Amino acid sequence: MSILGIDIGGTEIKAGRVDADGRVLSARSVKTPASLGALETALHYIVASGEPPEGIGIGCKGVINPETTRVEVLPGTLHYLEGQCLADLVLPAVGAGIPVYADNDARVALVGEMAWGAARGRTDVVMLTLGTGVGGGVVSGGRLLRGKTGVAGHLGHINVNPDGALCICGSHGCLETVFSAQAIEAEAFAAARRGCESLLTDWFQAKPQRLSCQAVFEAAAGGDALARSILARGIRALGAAIAGLAHAFDPEIVILGGQMTAAGAALFDPLRAEVAARTRVMLQREIPIVPQQVEDRSGIVGAAALVLGRGMECVFGREA
């Protein structure tokens, strides 16, 4: 038995065969094309191999209709997918008659955690994915929240500064503009361009492409004052956002996924302290804040979990 999991991201498209235990059997990836036609060609390349899968799961940024796989809203570089049914883009490469499920990529990551990770067996969970942007998903009372139009769970667009930077969603001061890989890199880049005294400035002058989010964490670990201040502001905003979510949903657990969680204790320790300080009066407990447990960070396994539906009646509205 194999399920085809596909993750359509702004940088890469990844696809892989996944077994019933959530193990990736094989995988391919390509850079995300800049046009719809090129994307269809890329999808054909990465999925058209081997025996037809028993089902296909797709994770994609934006607002996705899980009933039709239609992309309803998708600002940014993948805007050309708006109005497209993802099933129609994939099935020509694998053959008709195969069931296809699709949902927002961060919500898909939560589904993977529900099947095989930290959310398994839990009824109240908040998950944020911290990468180029910030995504999220919420399980409340055993139901995966989608809202009236499918927008529920876009936690990166919680406002943490009403007068902050313009966000891709059209608002100002969203969490994504403060604590995401792009936001941290942008702040570090601006400081380095100004010539602020920092390892980041030295690295930028020697090799501009080195000035990544990871580099900011590395500089902070080495004691760099500028890097530490950038991260401290970002983590404070993230902690405030999670505290607000905690008061709204009272979750059993908060799960963090995405590339930024590779920072480990440098992220989790101050974040846990920040959230605890902001929630202890009302909640009278500390909410566990943990990294995702599904080892595959590509999105392939979460997408496959949409098909398998193990223990996820809250995803499909039926018994698994």
Image (cartoon, rainbow, N blue to C red):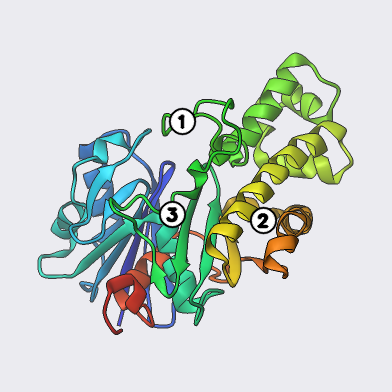
Give the residue at mark 1: 171
Label 2 vs 1, first from the N-terminus: 1
- Quarter the C terminus occupies: bottom left
- Give the left or right position of residue 17, taking residue 293 as reference: left
Q: Position of residue 295 (x, y in %)?
A: 56, 69
Which residue is located at x 68 percent, y 32 percent? 211
Which of disc 3 and disc 2 is earlier in sequence?
Answer: 3
Q: CA distance from mark 2 to mark 1?
A: 29 Å
The picture quadrant where one finds residue 106 is: bottom left
Q: Is residue 92 left or right of residue 297?
A: left
State the image coordinates of residue 137 (x, y, percent, origin top left).
Answer: 46, 59
Res 23 seen here? no
Front position in the image: 310 or 164:
164
Question: What secondary structure is found at the residue carrying circle 1?
Answer: loop
What crowding class fits label 3: few (fewer than 14 Cα within 10 Å), some (14-19), or many (20 or more)?
A: many
Q: State which mark lies toward you, 2 or 1.
A: 1
Which residue is found at the position 25% from the left and 41% from the top?
81
Q: Secondary structure at mark 3?
A: loop
Determine whether 259 is above or below 163 in the image: below
Amino acid on which disc 3 is placed: Gly
3D distance between C-alphas at marks 3 and 1: 16 Å
At 26% from the left and 34% from the top, the residue drawn is 35
Q: Nearer the viewer, mark 2 or mark 3?
A: 3
* Residue at the extreme top of the image, as rendered: 194
Residue 281, image x and y in percent? 74, 61
The residue that mark 2 highlights is 262
71 vs 180, left or right, is left
Please name the residue that numbered disc 3 is placed on: 153
The residue under label 2 is which amino acid type?
Ala
Name the residue: 65% across, 66% down. 290
Disc 2 versus disc 3: distance between alpha carbons?
Answer: 23 Å
